Amino acid sequence: MPSGRLIVLSLAVAALVVGACNPTPPAATPGATPGDTPGAQTPGATPAGPTGARLAAIQGRDSLICGVNGGLPGFSFLDEATNTWSGFDADFCRAVAAAVLGDPNKVEFRALSADDRGPALQAGEIDVLIRNTTWTSSRDASWGNFGPTTFYDGQGMMVNRTQNTAATLEDLAGATICVQSGTTTELNLADQMRVRNVDYTPLVFDNIDATYEAYSQGRCDAVTSDRSQLVGRRSGFTTPADHELLDVVMSKEPLGPVVPHGDDQWFDVVKWVVFATFQAEESDITSANVAQIAGETADPVLRRLLGVQPEAGELAAGLGLADGWVVTMISAVGNYEEIYNRNLGPETPLNLDRGPNQQWTDGGLLYAPPYR
């Protein structure tokens, strides 16, 4: 083959190889960003805003939108007569508002059902969900980012002792059990009964009030949910002493705040609000003494936390918060112990033992990373 033709052929082959390795990109779709596939959309996904957008939006509207249960005494409950919210979860909503807006009352509480909470997060309709919601792998991946666990719980089973003598899950063979749909409770119940080879009939409701109304009417032999929820709802019964939780824990249920995906700064803010309540309890800082300690302490750890150490301003600015935000927040709602005792402690109808919800120094699971 003549050398000239060989050169031309070689160049043609090289061009084909390059073209095969680097195919011509499709024409860009107007408004699309690099990597978008025209017409493709992730099911249930919403465009993520830039980091800082959520905090700026909250400060711009001067109100925090906090998703809660709304019907769970001790955690989040609306007293319709006075139009006031109370509870452990409601107070953590107030803590975030105090840290971000300087006022614990700048909260719009939004009651969400178990079925509605995930979509509300995915659509960005709420700023944070603080509603007895169990942290799971699938929810972490599809719903939003889970912050620190504020309440370590487990699933239980409650029966009416005037009608039922069951002591174990096996004793509930053939029973009808009330359970709420769209929850890990429903799935855990099926798992536990399958493992034990116990036949039962689930009576499923999509509403918390309907679930417990059916139980109180005797339409089911038992009701199952997080143990904290069972105790909370029992406190509203006419004769709470008639209802007993079986001595069984069916699952791990870590509960805490969740924020929509897509804004790391907002996620950091919510995390550190929770951590600050942990650290304040560990350091014996309360709503009553926080201002005094801020003005007098020589401890650099506390001075950073309370905004009086020189670099504390940089730490607050890194989160997008005002100097002294911890003092404002603790003054308004208290440390973790104060929030717990006010809503769930020994002087409340629930009287829940703290168990794993104690400081790590007391054998519990509450542990705050260093604020520095």
Image: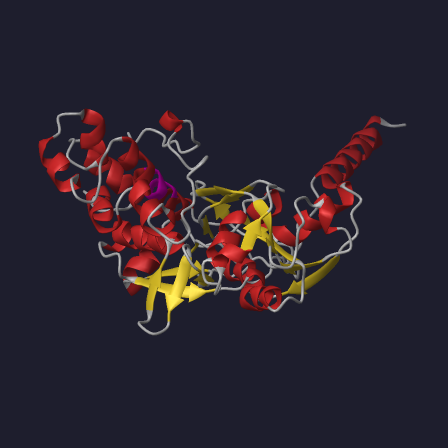
Q: Position of residue 254 (x, y in %)?
A: 51, 42
- Pick the front one: 355 or 11: 355
Q: Is residue 139 magenta?
A: no
> In the figure, is residue 340 to the left or right of 228?
left
Q: Is residue 192 above or below residue 107?
A: above
Q: Which residues are magenta?
A: 271-275
Main secondary structure type of the part rendered in magenta: helix
Q: Position of residue 90 (x, y in %)?
A: 37, 56
- Residue furthest toward the front? 162
- Pick the front one: 28 or 172: 172
- Residue furthest toward the bottom? 81
Q: Position of residue 36 (x, y in %)?
A: 60, 53
The answer to which image quadrant residue 178 occupies is bottom right
- Pick the front one: 3 or 209: 209
Residue 132 showing in the rendered view: no
Assign the N terminus to one quadrant of the image: top right
In the image, what residue occupies the spot 63% across and 42% down?
A: 250
Colouring: secondary structure
Give the total of numbered labels.
0
> In the figure, is residue 85 to the left or right of 324?
right
The answer to which image quadrant residue 75 occupies is bottom left
Q: Is residue 322 above or below residue 40?
A: above
Residue 172 showing in the rendered view: yes
- Residue furthest toward the left? 296
Assign the C terminus to one quadrant of the image: top left
- Pick the front one: 314 or 161: 161
In the image, what residue occupies the spot 83% across and 26% down?
A: 3
Q: Position of residue 5 (x, y in %)?
A: 84, 32
